[in-house]
Amino acid sequence: MGVEAIVVHEDLDAGQGVVAGGHGRRAFAAVLPDPRRIRMNFEPTQERSLIRSTAEEVAAEFGPEHWREKEREGEFSEAFWNELADAGFHGLLVPEAYGGAGMGMAEMGLAMETLCAEGCGMAGTWYLVLTAGMAAVGIREHGTDEQRDRYLPAIADGEVNFSIGITEPEAGTNTLAVATTARRDGDEYVLDGQKAWITFADRADAMILVARTTPLEAVDRPTDGISLCIVEMDRPGIDVSPIPKHGINYSKSCEVFVDGVRIPEENLLGEEDGGWWALVSTLNPERIAFAAAATGIGTLAADTAIEYANDREVFGAPIGTHQAVSFPITRAYARMEAARLMREKAAWLYDRGEACGYETNVAKATAVEAGIEAVKQSMQAFGGWGYAEEYDVERWWREINLTRLAPVSQQMAYNHVARELGFPKSY
């Protein structure tokens, strides 16, 4: 079979291009050059150096004490949100024509990881991933000119906050099973349904809501019939109820009930019934973001534990002299370094418009496992004090464990990787 006979199709769950006609991503390795053998330049550019130094300055102002207080009080940090706007981080993915920096996920990932690692913990990614990440990408790539003019400058300035309405009580990982509907009525859509775990819904100005415009039983493919709607949160018929949760209480995650909510047809994001592929284009950036969060939080915990291990003495020597303390943290740190490189590769591919679902899932899965191990071993180094609020590592433990579950579970990330390696589909 010649090269021109090979068919490339889209993976349904992550937008990953895969080669048909073989068994997995390695099927044609012997006869075809691997397009992923890439040449990445690790020389720090002036822009990346500025992003890193700016993120360090922001994190120094909003360090562990700030987030300890916000977590305890259950308060959103307006000051941090506004500082991210002043630093230009809300606009990293917004084109320059709309007041942003016109950069990519490589730069956003660097900003997120640095904020997390230098003292912000999960907040360094949490306050950026939805509005500056997913909403900015979705509207940039699939919005109308009017939608771009209306929302992108406001996103870059930090003047608008988006939530993303995907998850439902009976449709978590299986987004294709969403039951929320958008029924056309003249020049409007009428929305009905329920969403769950919708972060910022209590304070968001707008939500990008995933709904079915054609019932699942009436479409040829399960990916058909899904649409994305931009819903202003002050419209009648929306009820928001925060969910009590384990951590990250400096923002609310909510149930959202949508009952007869009307939006104009111009609030449709992308094409009617064609929203699945518009949604997919935001999922890879989200996975890159959570990979940055995992290595960032893990690095923060490890660095804090290393400092403690140099000061805390037991049996006449710093506890860091004992390999039982130093080696577990060191091993986790080494794994985070490798995961960080995979995230850089995934971002490099994404920013060039290349298929990157395999890389984003590998980056997310490996970063999460390495980061969780780093926090776990850092807590162990603190001994009993690792359980105390004042040392923060117990909060970072609660924060990083969410990355096992979102934005895609570790099991589903590995399911995608397994398919790419040639295993049969299991879902």
Image (cartoon, rainbow, N blue to C red):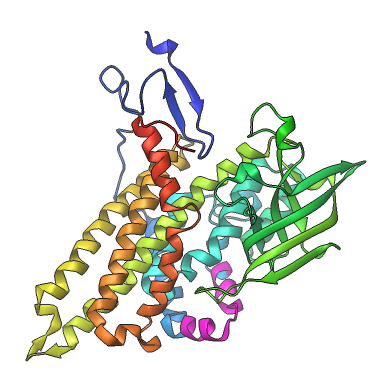
Q: Disc count in the image?
A: 0
Task: Confirm whether residue 19 shows in the render.
Answer: yes
Q: What residue is shown at x 52% (from left), y 85% (from top)?
A: 72
Residue at the top extreme?
A: 1
Image position of 253 (left or right of 388): right
* Location of the N terminus (image quadrant): top left
Magenta span main SS: helix
Image position of 244 (left or right of 343): right
Q: Is residue 76 magenta?
A: yes
Q: Between 243 and 268, which is closer to the camera in this rendering?
A: 243
Task: Confirm whether residue 44 shows in the render.
Answer: no
Q: What residue is shown at x 48% (from left), y 51% (from top)?
A: 408
- In the image, residue 346 sits, relative to residue 224, either above or below, namely below
In the rendering, at what x and y percent does residue 210 appear? 69, 48
In the rendering, at what x and y percent does residue 333 appear? 24, 63
Q: Between 259 and 58, which is closer to the camera in this rendering?
A: 259
Q: What residue is shown at x 46% (from left), y 51% (from top)?
A: 287
In the rendering, at what x and y percent does residue 117 appear? 36, 69
Residue 401: quarter of image: bottom left
Q: Between 351 and 427, which is closer to the camera in this rendering?
A: 427
Q: Is residue 356 magenta?
A: no
- What range of the chain is rendered magenta? 66-85
Q: What residue is shown at x 51% (from left), y 36% (from top)?
A: 15
